[in-house]
Image (cartoon, rainbow, N blue to C red):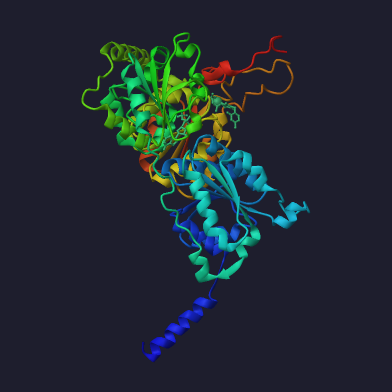
Amino acid sequence: MSEIERDIDADQQADEATALTDGFHLLIKALKLNDLKTIYGVPGIPITDFGRMAQASGIRVISFRHEQNAGNAAAIAGYLTKKPGICLTVSAPGFLNGLTALAHATTNCWPMILISGSSEREVVDLMQGDYEEMDQLAISKPLCKAAYRILYAQDIGIGLARAIRSAVSGRPGGVYLDIPGALLGQVMNEAEGIRSLVKVIDPAPEQIPAQHAVTRALDVIQGAKKPLIILGKGAAYAQADDLVHEFVETSGIPYLPMSMAKGLLPDTHELSAGPARSLVLKESDVVIMVGARLNWLLSHGKGKQWGAPHSTKFVQIDIEPTEMDSNVEIVAPLVGDIGSVLSSLLDGMGNDWVKPSVDWTNAIKDKKEANIARMAPKLKNNNSPMDYNGALGALKRVVEEHPDAMLVNEGANTLDFARSIIDMYKPRKRLDVGTWGVMGIGMGSAIAAAIETGKPVLCIEGDSAFGFSGMEVETICRYNLPICIVVFNNNGIYRGTDKNESNGGDVATTVFVENARYDMMMTAFGGKGVHAINPDGLYRAVTDAMDSGRPTLVNATIDPAAGKESGNIGSLNPVSVVGKK
Ligand code: ADP
Ligand code: TZD
Ligand code: MG
């Protein structure tokens, strides 16, 4: 080494010894190291500068008008990408607004990390009344999969690594990461800081099923006379699309997609039993659950809908061992990730696999064809005001012509009719209210869908559902996202025709302002607003929006009397034994 080189080397070592970093920079570097390059959030104390610095470092920071919508966006980003969606909030009220979305992500088994600024421990623990003081870590714990707090800058790397692994491994879910404000300003040696960062290796390892479990399941399936596959959103999440396709086609077993699993195989596939749902649930003797739970959405696997007293045998593929026997006995549990389990099943099926009888597949085909034929003329009506069938018939055509577009859907009748009428053609294109049937996921989901996929987004929203996140139309315009919102405006929740039975002054609890002009909410922020009064007009407006990519809101006037109470799930309402008062 020459003298000059020795001097430079000594200078570098001295620089390295004295160069400093802080919590802000380490957290940003840790996120980027793990390829987490989008943050959804709302700024404020103590995370405003963190958002600024993250943006300056090349992370995309999408600022919302309310944390719940930012959180719903992060939840959907997690579902679509298999990486934790990141939501960033301020302390106490901002944290609580985001927490609803974190609980929603956990309920739906989607990976998400809610990073929230918080007050210092010493003030919170003595309850001394800090600005936005709250024991956030304690509050978050029962509502998510895991919760961690980082107190020292040198723990940022390991803290984020724990959060990522907890969110995506096994059954995915929401993780809370508590960041006391002072942590961000904590200073440490830069070289040491960088060395403390962790790039998580294999965050969601494969989980391969035991061979004997595979053999047991294949024996049960092969012994069935009327087998059925149910595909859930866990199967969509797994991104094992080719294996799902191969399993259905090689086994020859008809399948029923749960709402967000629609499109894993095109809904027009000959083995789809979607339009014969009641028949297959009642009559099937062996059901193979693929990333779907036997919860309320499937009547808990028992009762009239399942053809009781006839009993159904269940085979279940799930990454979560405790999901087995949660509602009914699972005769062949297959614990593992969907990709690994399906490839083991396919390996075990071999050349002598016997497909289900044509009696069974033809019975389903006949029922399907009859139901489709019965609906076809209803979907073509051009009535004004529109009913759900006419309006959704028009949107069904738009989706058929734009199979790559993302679809977001919420409401009651607006949800139930759209789910059954609109065919999906590709995996993970349909985003909706999920396991809780929650209203308010609309704009957050739409924004994440646009940002994560770059595809146009069609949002089909009940007028009530839209109201929960409607202010985000400003966000949509600000980022100029290719989102077309169609508000199914029937003047209210379920229907717009209820009357206040007391003859009092207030309108009924389910009724909204008549003929509201939701389209003007979009024009207020520079987007395009359209008022559609019939299916032809609706089709034209939405087609234009999908092709132009311009933020658009179509206010679609729906007959206020067309819907029914609670859509398809009216039977879940309790009934007063002494009648209404
Ligand atoms: P749906 O509402 O569509 O019926 P659920 O949300 O009830 O679907 O069920 C999804 C299931 O998928 C959960 O039980 C979850 O544990 C499971 N799951 C999620 N990811 C995977 C995966 N990669 N492999 C296997 N199971 C998975
Ligand atoms: N609050 C939250 C967070 N989630 C909910 N599901 C509800 C309230 C209750 N609810 C439903 O289950 S659907 C719905 C509400 C308020 C709105 C239905 O009205 P809509 O759709 O206008 O969105 P339709 O087409 O008029 O039925
Ligand atoms: Mg409505």
Report the side of 106 relative to 245 (left or right): right
Judge by depth and name the residue closer to the eye, 445 or 544.
445
Residue 103 shows up from this direction: yes
**Residue at point 71% right, 23% down?**
506
User: Vertically, is 40 above or below 101?
Assistant: below
**Residue at point 39% right, 89% down?**
4
* Residue 248 x %, y %: 30, 26
Judge by depth and name the residue closer to the eye, 202 or 118.
202
Report the side of 302 relative to 348 (left or right): right
* Residue 251 x %, y %: 28, 24
* Residue 312 x %, y %: 43, 15
Taking the image in four quarters, ligand 3 sits in the one at top right
Report the side of 241 relative to 293 (left or right): left
Judge by depth and name the residue closer to the eye, 409 or 497.
409
Q: Quadrant of residue 482?
A: top left
Judge by depth and name the residue closer to the eye, 173 or 577.
173
Report the side of 489 relative to 500 (left or right): left
User: Vertically, is 70 above or below 327?
Assistant: below
Q: Quadrant of residue 236?
A: top left
**Quadrant in which the N terminus appears:** bottom left
